[in-house]
Amino acid sequence: MSLSYTSFGQIQKDLTASKISCLELVQHYLTNIEKNKNLNAFLAVYEQEALLRAKEIDEKLKVDKAGRLAGMVIGLKDVFCYAEHGLQASSKILNGFESQFTATCVQRLLDEDAIIIGRQNCDEFAMGSSNETSAFGPVKNALGENLVPGGSSGGSAVAVQADMCLVALGSDTGGSVRQPAALCGIMGFKPTYSRISRHGLIAYASSFDTVGAFAKSSEDLALVLEIMAGADEFDSTVSQREVPNYQSFLAKKPEKLRIAYIDNTISHEGVNPEVRKATQDTIAWLKSEGHTLEAVDFSLLEYALPVYYILTTAEASTNLARFDGVRYGYRSPNVTDIESLYKKSRSEGFGREVKRRIMLGTFVLSASYYDAYFTKAQKVRRLIREQTLDFFQKFDFLICPTTPTTAFKIGELSEKTVEMYLSDLFTVQASVAGVPAISVPNGQDSNNLPIGLQIMASAFEEGPLLSFANYLIKRTS
Ligand code: GLN
């Protein structure tokens, strides 16, 4: 049987009509995982467990007792705790580590009868834009084995792209869901900071980290967001706001919208001409649909990346201090005393990129440089947030390309740190400002590689954002 579902709605319809079962669905995804092994998207596949759970859920469906996600097969980026399952953030330093509890977001999906199919490869500790920093080797884009899928949630993006699961959870600190979604031709969504509990998500930069998701339909993103979002006693930073019915926003076509396009991203010299053209074509189409489009300049654009990298490395250097060879995972076998235990376990356990960031973060937090870098960056962060929120006084959405280029080649930027960081140029704004953003497919370049369009909305405006994204991807002309 050859199945190919791009939305959960289609699956539910076929489940109701008894055309398929959860068991067959899981078998279908397992076959695809096996077929696409060369892409290196999964670090662990929960084959037996997923089959067993599928059978149980099929029984529940028969007696009408199943949850809202019965039949949704989901993959997890290797940064989410899932009790009694391995967890490594794609790092050697967590060798052999098993979670003792389940992340709130994952638990909420399980409670609604989602089936977790496996743990997905990513950049080490979610630091990277190409999935080349994983201790388990790079993930490959399903559109070409020599191409990166983007990062850091590359395994999760490729798993959805190549139909190895319907939905995947990623984490987005500076673009790690949106950028790989753009490079793989699917949708990737990051909600407002604090919308979803971070309990059970391995911390990279705690004031930026968000739980995000990949899917091929806006309905699926709306549904999983609704289920995962909301208050949680285990995360004191999570928003207490009520969670709306996000799917209900998708039903109607948006009225006349006020949309700003960020001109200095589109005209930026680093932007590939085909990416520029695709963005301009979409702007022209939106105008032809009667929406108001206005060019704006995000004047702080050039500061967004430095601010992001100063603050996230500072937070990472403290968050990653806990991996010391004593409490978790890897411990160097060649130690003589406590100091060499720390030094050697950390030097051998972490990869190059993670070490680079710990050192950078330690530097910007050091007594002599704290004010010059860390305090200053905090101030500029505030300005970026204010300017971004100011745009939303006048406009419903801000749009720009998700990434300056389409998928680049494996190895092309791995030694060029600054150029690699530039691939986050447009995604970090929403992370620095804490607002929701989504990447939607926006055509292809002349090599048939996908181009992404990023849409940002004001804080907690996920409903209208998903509705607009839905309207854009369903356009026919
Ligand atoms: N590529 C960015 C970085 O390396 C974003 C990572 C992320 O969002 N986790 O920091």
Image (spheres, rainbow, N blue to C red):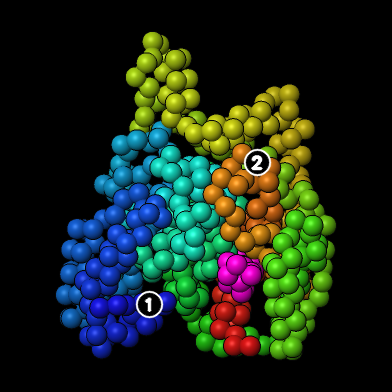
> From the viewer's perspective, is 167 left or right of 45?
right
Label 2 and label 1: CA atoms lie apart by 38 Å
Near-viewer residue (348 or 132): 132
The x and y percentages for residue 40 are 39, 52
Name which residue lies at 68% across and 42% down. Answer: 418
> From the viewer's perspective, is 421 left or right of 259?
left
Q: Is residue 174 above or below residue 9?
A: above
Amino acid on which the number 2 mark rests in the picture: Lys
Residue lying furthest top in this view?
Answer: 336
Q: Secondary structure at mark 2?
A: loop
Amino acid on which the number 1 mark rests in the picture: Tyr
The stretch in magenta equals 437-454
* Tag in front: 2 or 1: 2
> From the viewer's perspective, is 75 left or right of 409?
left
Q: Residue 118 lies in what quarter of the image? A: bottom left
The x and y percentages for residue 183 are 56, 62
Q: Quadrant of the N terminus?
A: bottom left
Q: Which mark is residue 333?
A: none
Q: Quadrant of the C terminus?
A: bottom right
For disc 2, the marked residue is: 416
Q: Is mark 2 within 8 Å of ligand 1?
A: no
Name which residue lies at 75% across and 56% down. Answer: 270
Q: Which mark is residue 5?
A: 1
* Crowd rating for badge 1 (residues with CA inside 10 Å; few <14, some 14–19, many 20+): few
Mark 1 or mark 2, which is nearer the start of the sequence? 1
